[in-house]
């Protein structure tokens, strides 16, 4: 699966990163640099509940399509909780 950041700036292979939520922000840590605290910001939301929902949608799309899909994190205003 390809994961595209909210702004379209980053396009990363899901299998080569750890996608995580830091409060209201969704980030990716590249697997080849796990010892580092550097991360790529994939999305930012106005509420933690929206970030949780976006992460759930990412996991659901990966499972539903067996990893063969491109997923882009939605804009803040497009997430309903």
Image (cartoon, grey):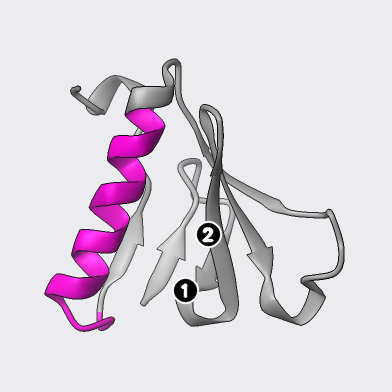
Residue identifier under label 2: 19
Quarter where residue 28 is shown: bottom right
Residue 21 appears left or right of 73:
right
Residue identifier under label 1: 14
Q: Residue at x 34, y 25 (%)?
A: 49
**Of residues 4 and 29, the one drawn nearer to the viewer in this rendering:** 29
Q: Farthest residue to the top: give it.
A: 46
Q: Residue at x 55, y 29 (%)?
A: 23
- Please check the rendered image and state whether residue 53 is part of the magenta-colored stretch, yes or no: yes
Residue 72 visible (yes or no):
yes
Element class at badge 2: strand
Quarter where residue 18 is shown: bottom right
Tell me if mark 2 has few (under 14), some (14-19) or many (20+) residues whose alpha carbon lies within 10 angstroms of its own. many
Q: Quadrant of the C terminus?
A: top left
Element class at badge 1: helix
Q: Residue at x 45, y 16 (%)?
A: 46
State the image coordinates of residue 25 (x, y, percent, origin top left). Answer: 55, 34
Residue 7, compared with residue 46, is above or below; it is: below
Residue 59 appears left or right of 17:
left
Residue 23, compared with residue 69, is above or below; it is: above
Residue 68 appears left or right of 5:
left
Q: Farthest residue to the right: give it.
A: 36
Mostly what secondary structure, the magenta segment? helix
Task: Report how far apart the C-alphas of labels 1 and 2 lie in the structure.
Answer: 8 Å
Asked whether the residues under the numbered discs 1 and 2 touch, taking CB atoms below 8 Å apart as contact, a structural biologist would say: yes
Of tags 1 and 2, the one toward the viewer is 2
Q: Which mark is residue 73?
A: none
Which contiguous range is marked in magenta?
50-68
Q: Residue at x 52, y 59 (%)?
A: 19
**Of residues 11 and 32, the one drawn nearer to the viewer in this rendering:** 32
């Amino acid at each position: 699966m390809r994961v595209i950041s909210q702004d379209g700036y980053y396009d990363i292979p899901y299998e080569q990163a750890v996608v995580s939520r830091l409060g209201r922000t969704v980030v990716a840590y590249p697997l080849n640099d796990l010892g580092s605290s550097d991360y790529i910001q994939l999305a930012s939301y106005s509420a933690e509940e929206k970030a949780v929902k976006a992460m759930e949608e990412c996991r659901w799309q990966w499972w539903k399509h067996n990893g063969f899909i491109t997923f882009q994190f939605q804009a803040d205003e497009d997430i309903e909780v």
